């Protein structure tokens, strides 16, 4: 057998709650609170998404433009580390940590594959002791991170394509690898279907129905005592 790989979705798989809206609000509150006055426009963009006027990618970019604007690369290390500590303390499933440790002990290379922004996922991955991340990238120019996606949003079929591209970049032959994948959501079916072992984690009903039809194991990892109980608006990944 070649290399063993374990690909984990992040939001609601490793974390209890989605991270995207929480990241935007966390950053805005700490670095430019007046931008919170623009939240009604974010809500309008969300309505446009529900009405299929605004695409998923456009919605993410609009929300970042409204709540964060562009960010100086030279000033990001400290806030990203602080945000990662916040997520680790308040929004991580203990069961996910245990499974990651078990996979690592079994010789698997752990990879987070998520639609969330690499901008903040890299620091969360480091806090979890994970070296490899496949995520949505943002455009950087003139020393600033812009509210514009570079390439594809790492979501749905694009996530599976980006995993395949990552494997090719690292010289990994799919036929010589054993792959495990973990996810909570039907949008990750393309990723799960490429796995030798697919695990459905903390899933919503549509994903559970698919799992039962395909015979995939269902894992339920409780939130733990430190998770955030406050319900924040969910912005699509």
Image (cartoon, rainbow, N blue to C red):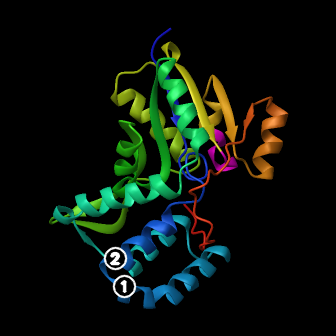
Q: Can residue 61 be seen in the rendering of this structure?
A: no
Regarding mark 2 in the picture, which secondary structure is present there?
helix
Residue 30: numbered disc = 2
CB under 8 Å between discs 1 and 2: yes
Magenta span of residues: 184-190
Regarding mark 1 in the picture, which secondary structure is present there?
helix
Q: Please report the residue visible at 39 percent of the width from the left and 27 percent of the height from the top.
A: 168
Within 10 angstroms of label 1, few (less than 14), some, or many (20 or more) residues? some
Give how far across and how far down residue 69 sits, in percent. 32, 77
In the image, 205 versus 155, the foreground residue is 205
Q: Please report the residue visible at 62 percent of the width from the left and 50 percent of the height from the top.
A: 224
Residue 33: numbered disc = 1
Give how far across and how far down residue 122 sits, in percent. 35, 48
Quadrant where the C terminus sits is: bottom right
In the image, 172 versus 17, the foreground residue is 17
In the image, 69 versus 120, the foreground residue is 120
Residue 227 vertical placement versus 44 (above, below): above
């Amino acid at each position: 057998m070649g290399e063993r790989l374990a690909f984990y979705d992040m939001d609601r798989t490793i974390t209890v709650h989605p991270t995207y809206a929480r990241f935007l609000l966390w950053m805005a509150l700490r670095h430019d609170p007046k931008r919170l006055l623009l939240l009604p426009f974010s809500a309008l963009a969300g309505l446009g998404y529900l009405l299929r006027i605004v695409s998923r990618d456009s919605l993410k970019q609009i929300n970042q433009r409204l709540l964060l604007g562009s960010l100086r690369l030279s000033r990001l290390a400290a806030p990203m580390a602080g945000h990662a500590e916040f997520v680790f303390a308040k929004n991580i499933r203990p069961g996910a940590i245990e499974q990651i440790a078990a996979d690592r002990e079994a010789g698997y290379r752990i990879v987070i594959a998520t639609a969330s922004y690499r901008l903040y996922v890299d620091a969360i991955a480091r806090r979890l002791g994970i070296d490899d991340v496949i995520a949505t990238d943002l455009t950087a120019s003139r020393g600033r991170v812009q509210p514009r996606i570079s390439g594809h949003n790492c979501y749905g079929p694009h996530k599976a394509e980006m995993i395949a591209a990552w494997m090719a970049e690292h010289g990994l032959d799919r036929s010589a690898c054993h792959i495990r994948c973990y996810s909570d959501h039907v949008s990750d079916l393309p990723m799960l279907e490429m796995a030798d072992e697919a695990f459905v984690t903390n899933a919503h009903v549509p994903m559970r129905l698919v799992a039962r039809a395909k015979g995939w194991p269902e894992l339920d990892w409780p939130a733990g005592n430190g998770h955030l109980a406050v319900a924040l608006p969910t912005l699509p990944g």
